[in-house]
Amino acid sequence: MTDAAKPLRADAERNRQAIICAAGSVFADEGTAVTLERIAAAAGVGVGTIYRRFASVEELVAVVLEEKMRRYADRTEEAAEQAIDHPWEAFRDWVLFILEQQATDLAFSDVVLSADDGSELFQAEVRRAFRASLRLVGRARDAGAIRSDFDHSDLLVLQHANAGLVRGTHRSAPGAWRRFADYMLQSFRVAQGPLADPPAVWARAQGPGARALD
């Protein structure tokens, strides 16, 4: 291998990092419904440069968000452990954490609600977070910290609702999610009356062998 080839490899790696950095900013601000051409323009490279490294937007999303999904899974496991001794605080803080992540990163908000693509590592972190969230909800409910009819799939309702709110207000009122979070947390804690049953399809999606966050 010649010395002349080394600068080319260095340039290629710089281009790759520029693409990942630019994609992270674009995804956070605009979500995952963007084109590789949009990423190329933000990175200052030709779209062909991106296609040589990433076959699709979905592949690039997985690379950009792998580390974020690892931190998300770590944080969810921490909350599940904290719930053993402090069930309400653990549940409350975790809900605030995930709603804030949705508000500050639209790509994360998209992916956490539809996480069936991505690398093996990405999927492993999604599954780890899902299992931890099941433990968190179970411990908080068993301790009486949240209403007895709270269903794990209610987190899906919460995240979908917050995603819609964030999409509509993230430029004009970026802190709107906080008021929504307070409303939801109060409703989760005190039962004022019976709830309608969660959709059956969501209950089936949480059975053995189901994909996380379907």
Image: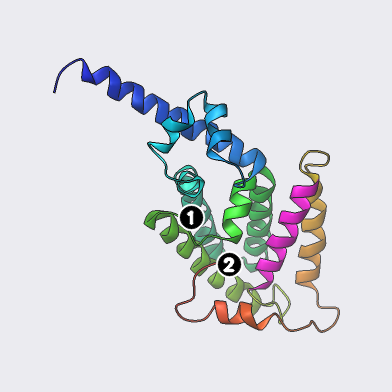
Regarding residue 86, the answer to whether it shows in the image is yes
Q: Position of residue 199 (x, y in %)?
A: 69, 80
Q: Residues within 10 Å of mark 2 (few under 14, many from 20)?
A: many
Q: CA distance from mark 1 to mark 2?
A: 14 Å
In this picture the colour scheme is: rainbow
Q: Position of residue 32 (x, y in %)?
A: 59, 47
Q: Which residue is situated farthest in the right direction here?
A: 192
Q: Residues within 10 Å of mark 1 (few under 14, many from 20)?
A: some
Q: Residue at x 65, y 46 (%)?
A: 106
Magenta-colored stretch includes residue 33: no
The numbered dot on residue 56 is none
**Chief SS of the magenta region:** helix
Please state the extent of the stretch shown in magenta in the rendering.
Answer: 153-168
Instruction: Give the secondary structure at mark 2.
Output: loop
Rendered-image quadrant of the C terminus: bottom right
Toward the viewer: 208 or 214? 214
Question: What residue would you read off at disc 1?
Answer: 74
Compared with 40, 153 (above or below) is below
Q: Which residue is situated farthest in the front direction here?
A: 48
Toward the viewer: 192 or 168? 168
Regarding residue 84, the answer to whether it shows in the image is no
Q: Identify residue type, mark 2.
A: Ala
Instruction: Mark 1 or mark 2: name the one nearer the start of the chain.
Output: 1
Q: Residue at x 63, y 74 (%)?
A: 152
Compared with 13, 156 (above or below) is below
Q: Identify residue type, mark 1.
A: Asp
Question: What residue would you read off at disc 2?
Answer: 83
